[in-house]
Structure formats: C-alpha cells, structure tokens
Amino acid sequence: MCETRVKVREHHRDWYTYLLLLTSKSGKEDLIKGMEAGADDYIVKPFDQPELSVRIQAGIRLLQSQEQLLRTREALREQ
C-alpha cells in the first residue's frame, strides 16, 4: 500500500490527489495502515450514503482550496 501512495503522490506534483479508501476492512489497525499509506479519508463497507456524501464534499472543499492556492501562486509568479 505504501508503494501505491508514493506513485500516486509523485505522479501529480502540481495538484493534490484526494484519496478516500472504501474498504471492507474495519479494524483499527487497517484504518491506521490506510491513513499511513497516504489516504485522506477511510470509510468501511457497507457504508452510509449520507456519510459518504459529506466525506466527498470535504474532499471537494480541500481540492477547491488547493486549486485556489495554485491560481494565487501562479498570479504571484506573473507579477
């Protein structure tokens, strides 16, 4: 799993890739391994649709913030 994190995180250097693990593994150690491997969030199957929706919305907010940061950085470079 850690090998996957390195590849995904290195592939997209200019923007952030939000990783939400959807898994049947429900043990605390599984959650810890998933988060240590680079996941931003972790949800266990069977999942609650409203919970998944709010977690995805949180990821969207993070990505929108990243996009704004990149636009601001580019504008500063142009000055």
Image (cartoon, rainbow, N blue to C red):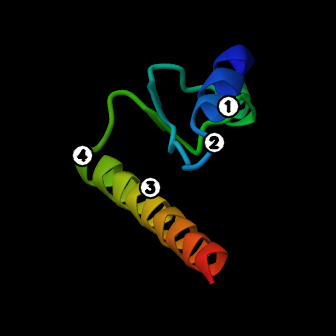
Give the residue type that dot 1 points to. Answer: Glu
Residue at the spot x=39%, y=59% of the render? 60
Badge 3 or badge 2: first in the primary sequence = 2
Displayed quadrant of residue 75 = bottom right
- Judged left or right of residue 59, residue 12 is right
- Residue under label 4, please give it: 49
In three-dimensional space, the C-alpha distance between marks 3 and 4, rounded to whole angstroms, equals 15 Å
Q: Can you say which quadrant of the picture contains the C terminus? A: bottom right
- The answer to whether residue 67 is above or below residue 18 is below
Badge 1 vs badge 2, beta-carbon distance below 8 Å: yes
In three-dimensional space, the C-alpha distance between marks 2 and 4, rounded to whole angstroms, equals 31 Å
Q: Secondary structure at mark 4?
A: helix
Give the residue type that dot 3 points to. Answer: Gly
- Residue under label 2, please give it: 13
| Residue situated in front as seen by the camera: 25 or 2 | 2
- Residue under label 3, please give it: 59
Badge 4 or badge 1: first in the primary sequence = 1
| Residue situated in front as seen by the camera: 18 or 44 | 18
